[in-house]
Image: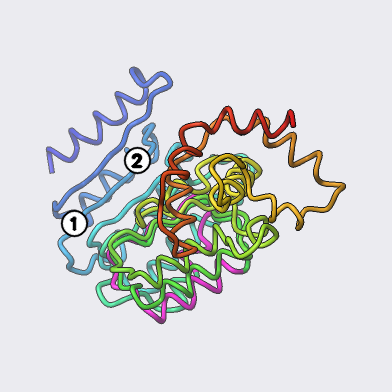
Amino acid sequence: MSYWKELANALIHWSGYHAGEETLQVTICCVETPNAVLDVLSLAMKRSKVRAFGFTGDGSPKTWRFAKFIVDMIHSNHEVTTVGFHSVVLSNQEWKTICNSIRIRSAQQHASMMDSFQLTKCFVDGISDEVLKDILTSNDAGVFLKRNGMSSREASIIAEFLGSNPPLARLCLMENRFDDDAALLANSLSSNTNLKSLEVDGNNIKEEGRLAFLRAIFDVSSLAACAASNHTCQVLGLGQVLCLNAFDDAAYNKWDKIFAMLASSSEDSFIIINTGLLSEVPASLMSVLLYRAYGQNEFETGFTDLYLELTDARRCERHDVWTTSAIRRHSVVCTT
């Protein structure tokens, strides 16, 4: 116990005399924390400038006092903006209590917003419907659900949630079992304009699922379909797909795709855009198109590769010419 008391005193002392504008990240890794230890740490965590608190367990169930300790810390210490757990086993009710405390904290005007809620390998065989909904709605900034054994049942809940366009900005679904459910998750992005990043690494997503995500954010069936694609969510974990929606501004992402489509679909190296597609553009919008063309000073080769993948076409010399001469091409469009 003496070591825990020293740690508690050190946290309070540092926060009071040395912190300045700095904050701490505290992680307790694979160490037993009986109730007496939690009592000692509780006072320190309430008074310390701790930004992030993490706990790694050994997979054995924790006592109800652990959940109470977390809830008290979230409510009393508004410096804490991130809480993360690895291999921590709690009852569904205890997880719901923690989720509710995060939700209440985020709703308080005078409190700092919770930045992320991280749960890694805390649910070996998936997450119950009710708890998953509570986790997803616990905060608007970031939810990380890595290695929790989630599959089809959870995918339908997550897809319905994302399709309702909630305010959640970041969602991590790494290393679960969504290989056969990628299309369901991808389709939910068509009506979502708030999610900024979705991480799907390690889900064994096959080609069909990858294409579903790609079409959701870069539909090349027509210019109108391209413009109506998701332009806000960057999908990580599917190779070059991450180059799409890389800007914070959705307008930049949309126009990048439109001009990539116009250039990549042209069949002539000397005609810089596919003029056939321009027939879809109303005359009243031509000036907007030309203005945006002048502002396109970058052209990612990944865009061309993704377009060719979606159209089942092969890359050839003219595509390389378009990629390397992007700035000159876009300037010419505006002057002819």
Residue 100 belongs to the span the image colors magenta: no
Q: Residue at x 33, y 73 (%)?
A: 179
Q: Residue at x 18, y 56 (%)?
A: 34
Query: Which residue position is annotated with label 1?
Result: 34
- The relative height of residue 90 versus residue 271 in the rendered view (above or below) is below
Q: Residue at x 44, y 66 (%)?
A: 211
Magenta stretch in the rendered image: 134-163
Is 61 left, or right, of 210 in this rendering?
left
Res 175 quadrant in image:
bottom left
Percent across and percent down for residue 238 are: 36, 57
Quadrant where the image shows the N terminus? top left
Query: Which residue position is annotated with label 2?
Result: 45
Percent across and percent down for residue 155 are: 43, 75
Is 39 left, or right, of 302 in this rendering?
left
Mark 2 lies on a secondary structure that is helix
Label 2, residues with CA under 10 Å away: few <14, some 14-19, many ≥20: many
C-alpha span from label 2 to label 1: 16 Å
